[in-house]
Image: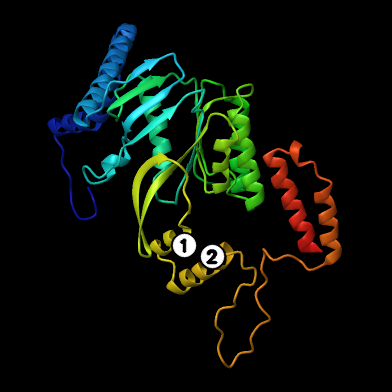
Amino acid sequence: TLSNCERYVTQELKEIEDTILGAEEKVIDLEYKIFCDVRSSIASQVNRIKRTAGCIAEIDVLCSLAEVADRENYCMPEVNNGDKIEVTDGRHPVVEKMLDEGSFVPNDVLLDTDENRIAVITGPNMAGKSTYMRQTALIVLMAQIGSFVPASKAVIGIADRIFTRVGASDDLASGQSTFMVEMTEVANILNNATKRSLIILDEIGRGTSTFDGLSIAWSVIEFISDKQKIGARTLFATHYHELTELENKIPGVKNYCVLVKEKGEDIIFLRKIIRGKADESYGVEVARLAGVPKPVITRAREILEHIESGNVALKQPKQNKHKKNSEGQIDLFALNSNMKAKDEVANEIMNLDVTTLTPLDAINILYKLQQKIKLG
């Protein structure tokens, strides 16, 4: 009896209530029993199931590679124990799918451990240098896992490792700057690469001053090209056009550049890699394409023209008529007029034995002399 009603129950309702309330526990017990039976049954056949799963996985990979090779018109590479990497009409398997059909420009690759050890690649940003280098590494990797490759012909001498230094990043958590991370990765490459390795280096030395960066890049190329130290097949992209002089100084170094067509103030990236060196980096034009404000681009062109012409007196941009003109912009390339410093520099130059200097020594000495004159 409750406050405002009375409740009646029958034996049949009581039995149904007990059945419903105990159903969940019975379901859990039954599920666990079935699970244990299935587990025991599988455990007794685990080795056979693992072998079957492995076969299915292998078939899945091979079918996927075959389907892509057929659909994307890949070729069967010739993989051998030689040292030559020769690719005709190579393509990037991912980038070409991101572009409109037929718009990707294929390129050839020729590397070996003799006359074509290092390819120094110059050209503007966005022209396709990094894509070219990455597609080469991917083609070598795909060939060595047994896949067809995105090219019309490919001969791949086996690489024991593929080393890459591409892109820039900071490791702030451990206090490492972009340049420190770059140098750490370069050190790992130089300490572990062998003659059979493939090395991909993108703009080594860009994270520090021009002279330091150029010196490091130059020295790295010398070290890798030396057969007694490494002598590995290497693709080396750079904006230091001075490095193109190494083709005539170091055996095995060859210059390549990306074709660019100028159309007035515009530039058209043709994405084709050819023998030779680039004359310009087109950095101002790339900045304009990126949306940098027009006044900045105009002023950048003025400064560039002055620097390239060797004119040390940069003109100040036009100032408001009501404002007092400044004394002039300090030119980083102008020589200090201190005669004592000039005399010291002249004496040092006279005492140099230029016949024994390496190119790297000459650059370092020139940099020190310039700093001495600037500081007076």
User: Where is the C terminus found, in terms of image quarters?
Assistant: bottom right
Q: Position of residue 315 (x, y in %)?
A: 59, 76
Query: What residue lies at 75% left-to-right and 41% top-to-bottom?
Result: 354
Residue 126 appears left or right of 353: left
Amino acid type at circle 2 is Leu
Residue 170 seen from this side: no
Quadrant in the rendering for residue 321: bottom right
- For residue 284, the mark is 1
Q: Nearer the viewer, mark 2 or mark 1?
A: 2
Query: Camera-side residue: 147 or 23?
Result: 147
Q: Position of residue 107 (x, y in %)?
A: 34, 36
Query: What residue lies at 22% left-to-right and 32% top-to-bottom?
Result: 72
- Local packing at callout 2 (Cα closer than 10 Å; few below 14, some 14-19, many 20+) is some
Residue 104 seen from this side: yes
Please say if 104 is above or below 332. Answer: above
Residue 327 appears left or right of 266: right
- Local packing at callout 1 (Cα closer than 10 Å; few below 14, some 14-19, many 20+) is some
Please say if 294 is above or below 207. Answer: below
Please say if 249 is above or below 149. Answer: below
Q: Position of residue 250 (x, y in %)?
A: 59, 32
Amino acid type at circle 1 is Val
Q: Are marks 2 and 1 in contact (CB under 8 Å)?
A: yes
Q: Position of residue 33 (x, y in %)?
A: 28, 17
Label 1, secondary structure: give it. Answer: helix
Query: What residue lies at 73% left-to-right and 50% top-to-bottom?
Result: 366
Q: First in sequence: mark 2 or mark 1?
A: 1
Q: Label 2 vs label 1: CA separation? A: 9 Å
- For residue 304, the mark is 2
